[in-house]
Amino acid sequence: MVATTVIVGGGLAGGAAAALLAQGGQRPLLLEKTAGEHDKVCGEFLSTEAQAHLAALGFDAGRLGGSPIDRVRLVSGSRSAEAQLPFTALGLTRRRLDAALLDHAAAAGAKVERGVTVRQVDGTALATTSGALTPASLLLATGKHDVRGAKRDTTGTLDHLIGFKQYYRADAATFRALAGVIEIVLFDGGYAGLQRVEDGMVNLCLLVGRPRFDAAGGGEGLLADLLREPHLARRLGNATPLLDRPLTISGVPYGFVHRGEDSAFRLGDQAGVIPSFSGDGMSIALHSARLAAAAVLGGATPAAYHARFRHDVAAQIGRATWLQRAGETVAGRHLLVAGIGLVPPLLRWAAALTRVPPTALRRAGLQI
């Protein structure tokens, strides 16, 4: 079967690219392996840049009921520091956001097929559970998971961390304490993000190194161990977990930026993976979708697209990775909290250094 453009992956980058291509006059085919809505290990922090990308698609993220966030609170042991964010973000689950974006892409004219797994990639040729495809253009938007035949070269990345995610129904005191704020809790062996999302839920998303994970005896033991950390115990000691089991993921290559030769356009985490604490992962995914869709519609090559993507975000990913390395040491954790506590504008400076720059957004046609 021949299709003009095939997008593999129905997450944020894939859904946005499908909508953009459909709005540009194509009828792209998007293949998503899951049959329905699903949760993902993600901090679910939708920055102002990400919201602008969605608005440019004609998609109003605000209507989905997310929780506004305009402050960040860093916590390390008994120390904490709070600063105003340079924007108002939204806490919004990927389950709700991704599903709504796929519906938006389908309404624009994209063909969305769920429950289809891509088993093999050979150039732009695909072997899938529903048959073979040979598209003129292939967009890989499979997130943190590689497809056979299209593995990323992640040499030198920070791939030793294990991610966990759990939703909670918190008590009234915790729910009030988290109003308008995202808490970044730094601890020995990793860090956690805690924030409100829609429907009165609280999202706990954390990353830990393998030694801390092994010492706790695995995922369930790790969560129990972390809930004895003073700050997390205070926040979640009386909370009710909402997932039967926490979601987990390992081997995420933080610091990765794609530099190889490809016949396909790589989007989102297939193109670059920024450390989660930066809060810019979803913005970068949407930025990659806009660049890739423009390249396909304009007849540009994957190599030209990847060079443009690297130009826009490689330095930001590198700086965020350096900060993550610093935060893994005791001295680095204390320095980060103390520095922002003494000079809150440092947060704006750090945010500017680790986000897609305004010049790149303007070149992509966005107004921030």
Image (cartoon, helix red, strand yellow):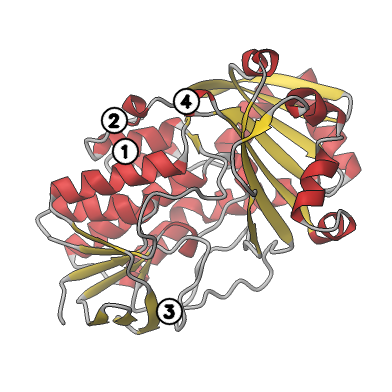
Of the image marks 1 and 2, the number of the one nearer the N terminus: 1
Label 3–label 1 contact, CB within 8 A: no
Label 1–label 2 contact, CB within 8 A: yes
* Extreme residue in the bottom direction: 122
Mark 1 Cα shell of 10 Å, populated few (<14), some (14-19), many (≥20): some
Of the image marks 1 and 4, the number of the one nearer the N terminus: 1
Which residue is the site of mark 2? 60
- Asked if residue 8 lies left or right of residue 146, the reply is left
Return the x and y of residue 127 as percentages of the image width and height: 32, 83
Mark 4 Cα shell of 10 Å, populated few (<14), some (14-19), many (≥20): few
Label 4–label 3 contact, CB within 8 A: no
Numbered disc total: 4
Mark 3 Cα shell of 10 Å, populated few (<14), some (14-19), many (≥20): few
Q: Residue at x 34, y 79 (%)?
A: 263
Of the image marks 4 and 2, the number of the one nearer the N terminus: 2
Which residue is the site of mark 4? 199
Amino acid type, mark 2:
Asp
4 or 3: mark nearer the eye: 4
- Asked if residue 215 lies left or right of residue 283, the reply is right
Amino acid type, mark 3:
Glu
At numbered mark 3, what does the secondary structure look like: helix, strand or loop? Answer: loop
Mark 2 Cα shell of 10 Å, populated few (<14), some (14-19), many (≥20): some
Distance Cα–Cα, label 1 vs label 2? 7 Å
3 or 2: mark nearer the eye: 2
Distance Cα–Cα, label 3 vs label 1? 29 Å
Q: In the rendered image, which quarter contains the C terminus?
A: top left
Residue 322 vertical placement versus 271 (above, below): above
Q: Which mark is residue 54?
A: 1
